[in-house]
Image (cartoon, rainbow, N blue to C red):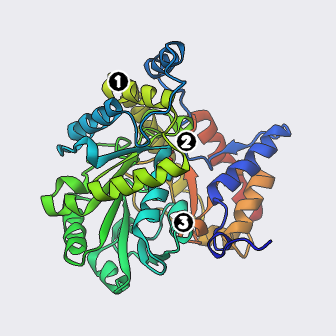
Amino acid sequence: MALSKNVMKVQPSATLAMSAKTKALIAKGVDVVNLSIGEPDFVTPEYIQEAAIEAIRSGKTSFYTAAGGLPELKTAISQRIEAETGVHYDNKQIIATTGAKFALYLIFQVILNPGDEVLLPAPFWVSYAEQVNLASGRPLAVKTTGAGHKVTVEDLEKARSPRTKALVLNSPQNPSGLIYTAEELTAIGNWAVSHDVLVISDEIYSNLVYNGNQFVSVVSLSEAIRKNTLLVTGVSKTYAMTGWRMGYVLGNPAIIKAMTTVASHATGNPTAVTQYATIAALNGSQADAEKMRQAFEHRLNYLFPKIQSLPGFELDEKPQGAFYLFPNVKRAVELCGYSTTEAFVEALLEEAYVAVVPGRAFGQPDHIRISYANDLDSLTQAYQRIADFIQTKG
Ligand code: PLP
């Protein structure tokens, strides 16, 4: 039987595919250093675990909650976002979903008609384009000319057409680690308002910011920009909760209502236990989250100069947030005698036992993504293995 046209356009997630290949090698007993992962390597803090256990023990598992999340969860989300951005959202402007990934999926489902275009400044996170395809929209990669892979108003204006419906902004950015300044966001936010382009602001890494850099949420910049923006975030990265699956969106109540309707026919509510765990995460002390942030900062400062020094690796801007490095490796690929980044990455995995992700899925085929969500010993080993690999091949 033929599959749907939308599904046939969709590629499996490159990051999950790499991760699966790596895990299969590890299961065979191969000692692979896995830098392909997009998940914190920490355990979910104990106070969050305890809240979940308490929810299970007290029987908060045998009922459906409201499809968009418990009212007390929405209140906890609202209070944390207000503490972090200074912006207040009412409960009717909030939906909790099964991960930020599903939140984004729902957004595209409810805003796009066939052929509507969504601007994706490159590099972009792998799932945006495929989710737009699944909603019959057209993902448009936007070439970025700003420092550190940032998109400018001029770049966006070049890509805009009468079909442009939305722009996905991601700061701090996966994979480049860049953070947009208030000035840059104001220019982009005002451009979007003036052309009626909805801003989808993916702020999932907003608490993973390093070395005194500042994160600014685009929604904090003006009333007009806030009204034209959907803020997407979640607990996966800040609280080491990737496996719990909890994300949320704040913004236009009509869009939130439509998303809730679709969710009610898709997943229903996000897992009840996860909702209670999230309430604890958001309302509790943020000390554990801060400890994890500091560990990531230390790793970035350790690994960045090492990766920068590798022959044929180009990495000019030091990442300010998230937990990835995104060097251009075009010269290293040539030096080692490969014709594509994919072949280089495959050889790194199979011969040097280091897993990274090729940049093509992020819209920049000459780059690779290296995650530093791993301990310092593993990062040292990975660096040494890549250096030895290049020396042997080059
Ligand atoms: N957005 C970005 C940029 C991400 O990197 C990720 C996860 O890797 C997500 C969204 C989705 O996060 P989750 O579905 O775990 O909440």
Q: Which residue is mark 1?
A: 287
Q: Badge 3: few (under 14), some or many (20 or more) residues near its Cα, within 10 Å? A: many
Side of 222 relative to 185 (left or right): left
Q: Which residue is mark 2?
A: 39
Residue type for callout 3 = Phe
At 82% across and 41% down in the image, what residue appears?
A: 30
> Mark 1 and mark 2: span between their CA atoms?
19 Å
- What's the residue at 48%, 48% (across, down)? 264
Amino acid type for the residue under numbered disc 2: Glu
Q: Residue type at mark 1? A: Ala
Please, what secondary structure does the residue beneath circle 1 have? helix
Q: Earlier in the sequence, mark 1 or mark 2?
A: 2
User: How many residues crowd around disc 1 within 10 Å: few (fewer than 14), some, or many (20 or more)?
Assistant: few
Looking at the image, can residue 126 be seen? yes
Residue closest to the eye, 180 or 157: 157
Q: Nearer the viewer, residue 117 or 92?
A: 92
Q: The N terminus lies in which quarter of the figure?
A: bottom right
Position of the C terminus, as image quadrant, is bottom right
Instruction: Tell me which corner region of the image, top left, top right, bottom left or bottom right, holds residue 62.
Output: top right
Residue 98 spot, x, y in % from top left? 50, 43
Outermost residue to the left: 223
